[in-house]
Amino acid sequence: MLPSKLPPPPTVLLDIVLNGRFVCQIPYHWVGRLEIIDGTPLYVCRDVEIRSYIESRRPSLIGKDYKIEFSNQRVL
């Protein structure tokens, strides 16, 4: 059973790293599905969905071996 008030989908900051160097930071408005895991509502998203979003925002990264790091600090 779902709780009466669900948390809103989070916005996370994705740090994109290519060849060990910081490339950019992209805010990602979580669009994953809501699942109940051990009685806790959690938003779930697949790696493919996140990579597709990043490559739509930065087409120059298509086909490159970049890393995604989740950040909680904004880059100025």
Image (spheres, rainbow, N blue to C red):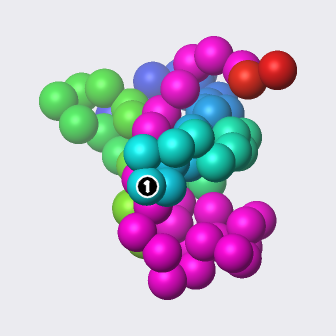
- In this view, the residue farthest toward the bottom is 63
Query: In the drawing, does residue 56 fall left or right of residue 31?
Result: right
Residue 9, percent across and down? 62, 36
Name the element at disc 1. loop
The residue at 23%/37% (across/down) is 37
Query: How many other residues sit within 10 Å of disc 1, few (<14), some (14-19) or many (≥20)?
Result: few
| Residue matched to label 1 | 19
The residue at 60%/71% (across/down) is 61
Residue 68 belongs to the span the image colors magenta = yes
Residue 15, percent across and down? 57, 39
The kind of residue on which mark 1 rests is Asn
Q: Quadrant of the N terminus?
A: top left
The residue at 58%/80% (across/down) is 62
Residue 73 against residue 43 in the figure, above or below: above
Range of magenta residues: 50-74
Q: Quadrant of the C terminus?
A: top right
